[in-house]
Image (cartoon, grey):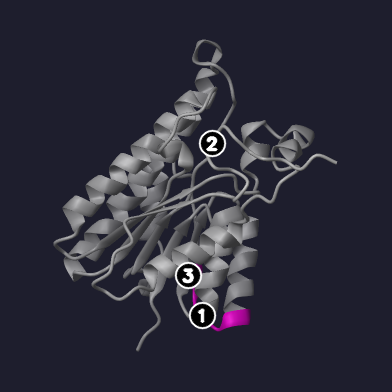
């Protein structure tokens, strides 16, 4: 039996990188998509050497439709049949009330979290449908289920991912192509560093005083979802730190 192939966006760090590693460890060939070429190239070499799988770099910014399509078209022949697509690329930028929002932040979140997911799915999904098999995993957020203060546009983009996840599942199930949504709470990655424009001190405080989720926790859930028997689809997984029952509450330890 030939190894299955997984295509992962946002694979240069965080959940994407952790997913690439756990899938390679379990015998998947990996296509790593992200903007940071040096990181992706190094990860390809690492995965190939450590797990004896194929790994290919696919360098693009998900916001740029033509770049997405051209980069995928240029991949080696073995990359043409994708069994698992993990739409992981996404970000939050800024944290303010709507009346004070930065329009550039809005554009970046909408273009990355919604349009980027659409571009990649539009390119990969037709092959899955024509072959009558495949699995699409969309990384959303608890912010796609519940709105929190100052998260207005970010939450809106993740609500859109939630809607797209449901729509894909309806439209693709007859093929059959499985579709799973993953909705994490607080995960300690570069997320807050990006949200706060590189402010390390502010980003660090987000995860202080409690045991947050780690990228491997989400990667492990993705592996679970895609390795269920063919007749089983995990529609949604909401994954929260024990200390975070809802987005607006985190129980922090006080020294």
Q: How many marks?
A: 3
- Badge 1 is on which residue? 53
Whole-number angstrom distance, CA of label 1 to CA of label 3: 8 Å
Q: Residues within 10 Å of mark 1 (few under 14, many from 20)?
A: some
Whole-number angstrom distance, CA of label 1 to CA of label 2: 38 Å
- Badge 3 is on which residue? 30
Rendered location of residue 160, percent (x, y): 35, 36
Q: Nearer the viewer, mark 1 or mark 2?
A: 2
Task: Determine the secondary structure under disc 3.
Answer: strand
- Residue found 27% across the figure and 57% down from its top: 125
> Along the horizontal axis of the image, is 129 left or right of 186?
left
Q: Residues within 10 Å of mark 3 (few under 14, many from 20)?
A: many
Disc 1 + disc 3, Cβ < 8 Å: yes
- Badge 2 is on which residue? 247
User: Above or below — where is 171 with respect to 80?
Assistant: above
Rendered location of residue 168, percent (x, y): 24, 50
Between residues 69 and 178, which one lies in front from this camera angle? 178
Question: Residue 110's mark?
Answer: none
In this view, which residue lies farthest toward the left? 174
Can residue 245 be seen from the camera position used here?
A: yes
> Along the horizontal axis of the image, is 12 left or right of 233?
right
- Residue found 39% across the figure and 66% down from its top: 225
The residue range painted magenta reads 50-56
């Amino acid at each position: 039996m030939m190894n299955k192939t997984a295509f992962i966006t946002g694979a240069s760090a965080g959940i994407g990188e952790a997913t690439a590693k756990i899938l390679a460890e379990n015998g998947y060939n990996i296509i790593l998509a992200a903007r940071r070429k040096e990181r992706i190239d190094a990860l390809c070499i690492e995965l190939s050497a450590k797990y004896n799988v194929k790994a290919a770099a696919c360098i693009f910014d998900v916001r740029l439709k033509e770049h997405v399509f051209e980069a995928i078209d240029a991949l080696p022949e073995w990359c043409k049949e994708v069994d698992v697509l993990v739409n992981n690329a996404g970000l939050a930028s800024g944290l303010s009330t709507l009346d004070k929002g930065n329009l550039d932040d809005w554009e970046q979140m909408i273009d990355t979290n919604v349009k980027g997911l659409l571009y990649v799915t539009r390119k990969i999904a037709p092959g899955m449908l024509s072959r009558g098999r495949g699995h699409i995993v969309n990384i959303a957020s608890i912010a796609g289920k519940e709105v929190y203060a100052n998260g207005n546009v970010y939450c809106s983009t993740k609500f859109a991912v939630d809607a797209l996840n449901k729509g894909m599942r309806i439209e693709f199930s007859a093929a059959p192509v499985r579709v799973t949504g993953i909705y994490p709470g607080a995960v300690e990655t570069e997320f807050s560093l990006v949200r706060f424009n590189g402010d390390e001190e502010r980003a660090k405080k987000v995860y202080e005083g409690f045991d947050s989720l780690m990228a491997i926790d989400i990667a492990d859930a993705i592996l679970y979802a895609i390795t269920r028997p063919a007749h089983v689809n995990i529609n949604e997984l909401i994954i929260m730190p024990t200390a975070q029952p809802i987005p607006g509450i985190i129980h922090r330890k006080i020294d």
